[in-house]
Amino acid sequence: MNKKIVGGGNMKKMISLVIAVIATVSSAIAVPQTAAVDTTQAAKQAKKALKLMNKDNEKDWQKGFAMYRDAAYKGLRSAQRKLFDFYLSQTPRAEEDAMEFAKMLADEGELEYQYMVGYYYILADSAATAPRNAVLGAHYLKTAADNGDVKAAVLYGTCLIEGRGCFIDFDAAERYFLTAADKGNDTAMEILGEIYYFEKYGRVNLEKCFKYTRMGAELGNSEAIFNLGCLYMNGEGVTKNLDEAIYWFTKSSGLGNAGAKNNLALVMEEKNGKSDDALFLLRKSADAGDAMAQYNLGVKYLLGEGVINNEEKAFSLFRKSAEQGCAEGQRELGRAYLNGIGTIADSALGFKWLEKAVLQNDSTACVFLASCYFQGEGTDKDDDMGFVYVKKAADMGSAFGLYAMGSCYLSGLGVAKSEETGFRYIRQAADLCNVNACEELAYLYLSGIGTAKNANLAISYGKKALELGSEDKGAIYYNLSFAYGDSDKKMRNEYLRKAAELGFPDALINYGLYLYYGDGIPKDENKAKEYLRKCAQQSDNPEASAKAKEIIKEIGNK
C-alpha cells in the first residue's frame, strides 16, 4: 500500500489485500469428512505403502501410493501432511489435491492448516491452480483466528473490511485487528491506524490512529512509517512536528518509498523555506516514478511556483501521474484536456479522465464532472446527472462540493430552486473555509437571500474571504462598502476606494460621486471626474460605461 499526500497530506483512502484476489463464491461451505478408523491400522497400511513405493518399478509405486492416500483418507495425519507437501511440489502445482488434505488437517483442528487453507482460498498468485473460493477461505480464516492464529486474524479482518467471503462488518474487523495488534502484529497496527483515520469506517479517532500507527512504525512496518510522517506533517492526532515528519519520511524514503521523497520535499519547503532543496527532492521522487510527486511537481509548473511556468511540462507530468492511477493526476489531466492547458483541447478526453478520478472518489473531480454535464462538455448536457455528481461530492464532506450544492439550489440547476437550502449549503462550505463560499455568503447576508439580512455577518465573511486569498477582491471590497453603508462612512469609503482602484466599475462610479459631493470624504471634483472617466473607458462593461458617461455629462453642465 502506498499512502498519498495531496496538498499537505491525507493518507490513502483504501485498505486492500496485498496479493490480487480472484474470488469464486460458493453457495455453501463443504467441509470434508474423514472416516473414523483405527489410526494404528492406517499407520501400518502407510508403512507397507512406503515399502512398495521404495521399490524400483512404476507398478509397485502406483500401488503403494494408492495405499498411502487411503491411509490419509482414514485419518493418518502424517500421511495427510506429506501428501499436502507432495502435491504442492509438483510442476505445475496440484493445489486442488493439496487443499483436499490440508482441509482434513484443518478440520482436525490443526491451526497451521486452518490458516493455510484460508490463505489459499482467499489469495491467488500467478502460480495458483486451485479455484478460488472466498466463502470457504473466510470460514477457515475465522476458525484459525478464533483459535488464536495472529496472521489469520489480520487476513480475516481484511475480509471483514472488504466483504470478501463474508458480510462487511467494521466492528468485528476492529476486534480482530486489536487482538492481533495486542500480540505484536505490526500489520494489524498499521491497518488500525487507517481504520481510525478514515470516515468510511465510522470510527474516526485521530489519537488512536496516531497511537497504533506509531506502534507499527516503531516495529518497522513500512506503511506505518510513511503514515506516521503524514500525521506529524499535518498535526493529526499529535502536535504538528516537522522535524519528526522529516525523520519518518527520511526513514520511509530509505526503504524505497518514492512517495516519501515527495512528502519530504513538501515538509522541507515548509520548514526551511528553501524551495530549491524541496524541488530537488520532488524532482527526484517524480523521476523515480512516484505518481503523487509527478502530480505535485506538475502543479508547480502549472502555477509557476519555484519554477518557470510551463504548461506543457505540467501536462506531461499530470499524464504520467494519471496513467499510474493517481486520482489527483487524473483529475488535473482531465482539466488540462478540457481547457487546452499544455495540450490541444479535447473535451471527450477531459471527460474520460475526470470519470476515472471520480471512480476513485476524488470529490473535486466530481464537481468538475458535474460541470461537464451542466455545460455539455465531452458529454450530452444533462442537468440531472450534473446534480448527481455535485451531491456525491457534497456527501463526501467536500467544501467545494458543498459550495457547488448550494449554488445548484440557489439557481435551480438540476434540482428544484430553494434559496434557503442553498444558503445552508453555502454556509457549511464557508465554515469549512471555502473561499468562494465565503464570498457568496457575504453577498447572501448583504442581500437577504435565503436568510435575513445581516450586515455584520456580511462583513465577517467578506473579510474571511480576503484572508483566504480571494482573487475577486474588487467585488468583495465593493460589498464590504455596502455592508458598512452610512453607519460608518469612513469604512464605507475606504473599501469603496480599494474597489475603485482595482477597477471595479460600480465602485468607480460611487466613489467618484462621493468625492464629487464630499459625502464622508473631502470634496474633490477633479479626482471625482478622474474615477468616472476610468469607468467610462471600460469597453468590457458597456452598461457601467454608459452610466459613467451620463454622470460626467450631467455634472459637466452644472
Image (cartoon, grey):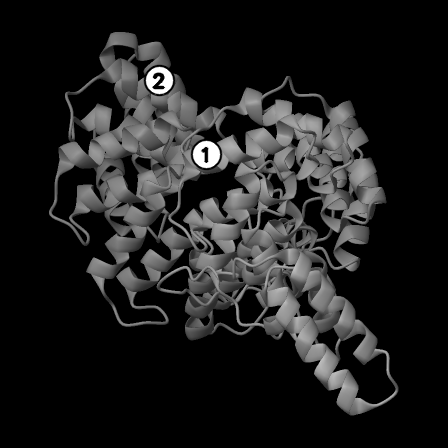
Which residue is found at the position 35% from the left and 53% from the top? 539
Local SS, label 2: helix
Could you say which is closer to the camera, residue 284 or residue 78? 78
Numbered label attached to residue 144: none
Residue 253 against residue 100 in the figure, above or below = above
Tell me where residue 383 appears, x and y as whole percent.
21, 60
Q: Earlier in the sequence, mark 1 or mark 2?
A: 2
**Separation of marks 1 and 2 at Cα, in angstroms:** 14 Å
Please name the amino acid that badge 1 sits on: Ser
Could you say which is closer to the camera, residue 428 or residue 17? 17
**Circles 1, 2 touching at the beta carbon (< 8 Å):** no
Tell me where residue 556 appears, x and y as whole percent.
26, 34
Numbered label attached to residue 460: 2
Whether residue 121 is visible to the viewer of this picture, yes or no, is: yes
Which residue is found at the position 53% from the left and 35% from the top? 176
Could you say which is closer to the camera, residue 234 or residue 147? 147
Residue 558 located left or right of residue 236: left
Q: Quadrant of residue 192?
A: top right
Please name the amino acid that badge 2 sits on: Ser
Q: Residues within 10 Å of mark 1 (few under 14, many from 20)?
A: some
Q: Residues within 10 Å of mark 2 (few under 14, many from 20)?
A: some
Numbered label attached to residue 470: 1
Where the C terminus falls, by quadrant? top left
Which residue is found at the position 28% from the left and 33% from the top? 426
Local SS, label 1: loop
Residue 455 against residue 432 in the figure, above or below = above
Residue 534 located left or right of residue 276: left
Residue 232 against residue 316 in the figure, above or below = above
